[in-house]
Image (tube, rainbow, N blue to C red):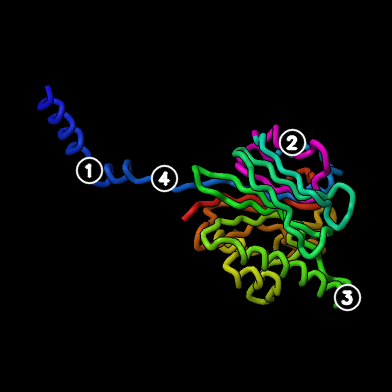
């Protein structure tokens, strides 16, 4: 019986080409889908409507900016099949119901609120595991320096504080940073100081991998005229391109706007 069994196995193996055997033995890449959405304190849509709109994307993790407190994120997550939720401790800029939150299909642990110099601007961080690999998820809503030089300097200081926090993390950590960054990407015609600060520590936007030109697109100012929107891509998904790459993704264009921002999503693959 043993000889017959071995013969059958050998016949099975030799009946397949080398490429077929290689394909079967090669492990599939680890992928996960993420998204970020500034929901404008839920002013334009209920969490169930937002969840239903995003459900076809079959997301694994989503970061919300300007999410209301309470059960808002839990209700959106329930529609998305995400039962694990983290709500940040501090509302952005001290405004009412502008929390950074995270919803995930896989458990979230190690919650931390990173101060960007003070409690007015923070980053909500939690860790999840994708097929046993730890991923540090950061939900952000940065300030925008525009009023005067003092305001620009304050914003620069806060973003620097977050970058310094990232630099102190273990080199092997896989970080994904998502949300409303309030700055546009660098382009051949214009350099973003803040984008460069992230590039300098090894992080870049999914737009680079996806070869999406953001200069004629927008993710914000949805209710303004088209002329006022152009070039306002300020919602991003960032990661270290040496560890992660985006293999698909886009700005989600909705026929019925659910916020003054648009959701952005990416299919990320671990290298």
In front: label 4 or label 1: 4
Which one is earlier in the sequence, the residue at label 1 or at label 2? 1
Distance from disc 3 to disc 2, alpha carbons, whole Å, reads 39 Å
Residue pictured at 11% horizontal, 25% vertical: 4
Dot in front, 1 or 2: 2
Dot 4: element? loop
Residue 239's quadrant in the figure? bottom right
List the residue tagged with mark 2: 74
Q: State which tag comes first along the sequence, 4 or 3.
A: 4
Left-right relation of 16 to 159: left
Q: Nearer the viewer, mark 3 or mark 2?
A: 2
The percent coordinates of residue 153 (x first, y second) are: 81, 75
The residue identified by callout 1 is 17
Lateral position of residue 2 relative to residue 92, left or right: left
Query: Of residues 154 and 247, which is closer to you in this image?
Result: 154
Above or below, 163 relative to 264: below
In the rendered image, residue 48, in percent from the top left (x then y), is placed at 76, 34
Which residue occupies the foreground of this view, 158 or 148? 158
Taking the spot 83% from the left edge, 55% from the top edge, the residue there is 92
Q: Quadrant of residue 128?
A: top right
Locate the N terminus and report the quarter of the image it occupies: top left
Q: Magenta region: which residues? A: 54-81
> Mark 3 or mark 2: which comes first in sequence?
2
The answer for how far apart the CA atoms under marks 1 and 2 are is: 50 Å
Between disc 2 and disc 4, the foreground one is 2
Mark 1 element type: loop
Residue lying furthest left in this view?
3
Lower position in the chain sequence, tag 2 or tag 4: 4
Identify the mark nearer the N-term, 4 or 1: 1
């Amino acid at each position: 019986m043993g000889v017959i069994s071995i013969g059958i196995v050998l016949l099975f193996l030799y009946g397949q080409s080398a490429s077929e055997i290689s394909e079967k033995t090669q492990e599939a890449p680890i992928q996960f889908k993420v998204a970020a959405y500034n929901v404008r304190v839920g002013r334009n849509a209920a969490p169930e409507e937002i969840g239903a709109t995003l459900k076809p994307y079959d997301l694994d993790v989503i970061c919300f900016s300007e999410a209301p407190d309470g059960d808002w994120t839990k209700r959106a997550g329930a529609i998305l099949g995400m039962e694990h939720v983290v709500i940040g401790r501090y509302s952005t800029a001290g405004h009412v119901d502008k929390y950074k939150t995270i919803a995930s299909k896989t458990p979230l642990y190690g919650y931390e609120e990173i101060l960007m110099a003070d409690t007015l601007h923070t980053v909500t961080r939690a860790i999840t595991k994708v097929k046993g690999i730890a991923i540090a998820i950061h939900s952000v809503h940065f300030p925008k320096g525009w009023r005067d030089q003092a305001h620009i300097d304050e914003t620069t200081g806060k973003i620097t504080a977050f970058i310094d926090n990232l630099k102190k993390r273990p080199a092997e950590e896989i970080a994904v940073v998502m949300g409303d960054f309030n700055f546009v990407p660098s382009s051949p015609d214009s350099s973003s100081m803040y984008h460069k600060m992230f590039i300098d520590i090894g992080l870049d936007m999914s737009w680079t991998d996806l070869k999406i030109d953001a200069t004629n697109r927008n993710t914000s100012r949805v209710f303004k005229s088209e002329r006022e929107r152009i070039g306002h891509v300020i919602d991003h998904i960032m990661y270290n391109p040496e560890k992660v790459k985006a293999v698909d993704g886009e700005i989600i264009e909705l026929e019925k706007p659910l916020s003054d921002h648009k959701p952005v999503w990416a299919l990320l693959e671990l290298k």
